[in-house]
Image: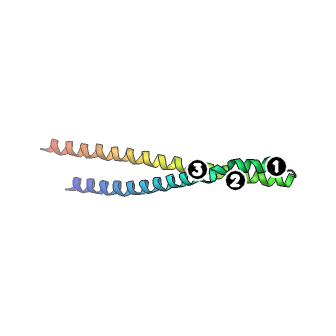
C-alpha cells in the first residue's frame, strides 16, 4: 500500500511539473515568435540611427539604445535556454520515475 501511494504521489508531482514546464515552454515560444516577427526586424533601423548620429550626445544615446536592445535580446535567449533546460529536466525526471516504478515492481515480484 505504501508503495502504490508513493507511486501515486510521484505521478501527481510529475503531472503538475509537466504542466508547468509545458506552460513555460508555450509562453517562451510565443515570446520568441513575437520577437522574431517584430522587434528583431528593427535591428537594421537601430543600427542606422547610430550610423547617422552626428553629435556626441546623439551617438551616446544611440549607443545606449543599441546596448539596451542587445540586452533584451540576450534576456529572451536566456529565457529560451531556461525553457529548454526545464523541458530536458522534465524528460529526465520522467525517466527517473519510470525507473523507480520498475524497481518497485521488481521488488514486489521478489517478495512473492
Q: Quadrant of the N terminus?
A: bottom left
Q: Nearer the viewer, mark 2 or mark 1?
A: 1
Dot 2 and dot 3 residues touching (CB under 8 Å): no
Extreme residue in the left direction: 112
65 relative to 110 in the view: left or right: right
Kindly indicate whether the residue at mark 1 contacts the one at mark 2 (C-beta within 8 angstroms): no
Residue of label 3: 36
Whichever of callouts 2 and 3 sits on the residue coming sooner in the sequence is 3
Corner quadrant of residue 96: top left
Residue at image location 34% in from the left, 53% down from the top:
14
Numbered badge on residue 37: none
Identify the mark at residue 68; answer none if there is no mark.
2
Mark before the other along the chain sequence, 3 or 1: 3
Is disc 1 surrounded by few (<14), some (14 to 19) or many (20+) residues within 10 Å? few
Say which quadrant the C terminus sits in: top left
Q: CA distance from mark 2 to mark 3?
A: 17 Å
Name the residue rendered at 47%, 46% in the picture.
85
Measured as percent of width and height from the top left, residue 88 is found at: 43, 45
Please tell me whether mark 1 sits on a helix, a strand or a loop: helix
Q: CA distance from mark 3 to mark 1?
A: 25 Å
Residue marked by disc 1: 52
What x and y, as percent, mark residue 71? 66, 51
Label 2 and label 1: CA atoms lie apart by: 18 Å
The disc, 2 or 1, on the residue closer to the chain's N-terminal end is 1
Sort mark 3 into few (<14), some (14-19) or many (20+) by Cα contacts within 10 Å: few
Residue at the limit of the structure toward the right, as seen here: 55
Closer to viewer: mark 2 or mark 3: 3
Q: Which residue is more in the foreground, 41 or 56?
A: 41
**Element type at marker 3?**
helix
> At 24% from the left edge and 57% from the top edge, which residue is drawn?
5
Place of residue 111 in the rendered image (x, y in percent of width and height, measured from the top left): 15, 44
Amino acid at each position: 500500500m505504501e508503495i502504490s501511494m508513493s507511486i501515486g504521489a510521484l505521478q501527481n508531482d510529475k503531472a503538475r511539473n509537466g504542466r508547468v514546464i509545458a506552460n513555460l515552454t508555450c509562453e517562451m515560444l510565443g515570446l520568441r515568435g513575437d520577437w522574431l516577427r517584430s522587434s528583431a526586424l528593427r535591428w537594421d533601423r537601430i543600427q542606422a540611427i547610430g550610423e547617422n548620429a552626428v553629435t556626441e550626445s546623439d551617438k551616446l544615446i544611440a549607443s545606449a539604445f543599441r546596448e539596451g536592445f542587445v540586452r533584451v535580446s540576450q534576456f529572451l535567449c536566456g529565457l529560451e535556454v531556461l525553457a529548454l533546460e526545464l523541458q530536458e529536466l522534465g524528460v529526465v525526471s520522467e525517466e527517473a520515475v519510470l525507473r523507480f516504478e520498475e524497481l518497485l515492481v521488481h521488488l514486489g515480484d521478489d517478495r512473492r
